[in-house]
Amino acid sequence: MLNRRRKLYEGKAKIIYEGPEPGTVIQYFKDDATAFNAQKHDVISGKGILNNRIAAHLMTRLESIGIPTHFIKSLNMREQLVRSVEIVPVEVVVRNIAAGSLAKRLGLKEGTPLPRPLIEFYYKNDELGDPMVNDDHIMAMGWADPYELEEMISMAFRANDYLNGLFAGINLQLVDFKIEFGRIFGEYGDVYIVLADEISPDTCRLWDAQTNEKLDKDRFRLDLGGLVEAYQEVAVRLGLIPREGIIKEGDFNEELAAQLETIENEMAGRTNIRSIKRMRAKKGTPVV
């Protein structure tokens, strides 16, 4: 691990440290597993290692199709170097198949395909239980303006299209997923929206396409067991670790892991990011 820098923030699954250069931070993946707004908690050895590798890979793939992300490169088995962003306090959930809270709220049978992908918004506030909100709430409360929200929705649908195909190619169904966005402020007052946080089995529902076996955090939520084994299966199918795995019965195979290549976002800094400020000006809205 890198020498410890100043801790900036600690969440349920990650710790953010100051980065080696201005405009960067280090994102450290913990082994903590939480559910129901941290009412359920455990530490599961190896979980953070797998999430780090899967998230790095998926961010790089999304950047390759022009979706800007905060990811720069993986540093080791638990840490990533990412761009420093101001997080928009809204979680964006994209749903393809009825499951979880959607199935419960609308009385749908789990596994029912939705007629089209749905987007939901949740206000990021643990004390309030991350309440569901709509676009009017978001704009009225100043969490994002109409142009930022439009960009977030557009990127969410594009990410869903791409990830659906990616996971289908490895015999997985992308049931739903949660993403977060951040702002990067340019030198001349430009504001850029980028995909931030992580995309991993912690933030996605992934089912085997043939058996509907859950290979995501529902294994922890529903006391199914085998969470690390499920995450490892996702990593194996993505080609990120060998079939024999790097974690067995909680033991981490450091020798095998050391042979794995680090993941670097070759498109970092080269993706054509649209400036929200310029979008406003183009649409006739005064720029302050």
Image (cartoon, rainbow, N blue to C red):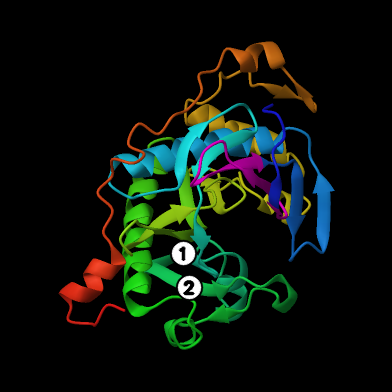
Q: Quadrant of the N terminus?
A: top right
**Mark 1 or 2, closer to the camera:** 2
- CB under 8 Å between discs 1 and 2: yes
Q: Is residue 97 left or right of residue 251?
A: left
Residue 255, image x, y percentages: 68, 11
| Kind of residue indicated by mark 1 | Arg
| Kind of residue indicated by mark 2 | Glu
Does the magenta run of residues contain 12?
yes
| Above or below 21: residue 33 | below
Mark sitting on residue 95: 1
Under circle 1, the secondary element is: strand
What secondary structure is the stretch in magenta mostly built from? strand
Under circle 2, the secondary element is: strand
Magenta residues, as a range?
A: 9-28
Q: Name the residue that disc number 2 marks.
A: 120
| Above or below 19: residue 189 | below
| Above or below 167: residue 8 | below
Q: Quadrant of the C terminus?
A: bottom left
Residue at 47% from the left image edge and 25% from the top image edge = 239
Residue 18, image x, y percentages: 62, 44
Nearer to us in this view, 178 or 118 = 178
Q: Quadrant location of residue 96?
A: bottom left
| Mark 1 or mark 2, earlier in chain | 1
Nearer to us in this view, 252 or 84 = 84
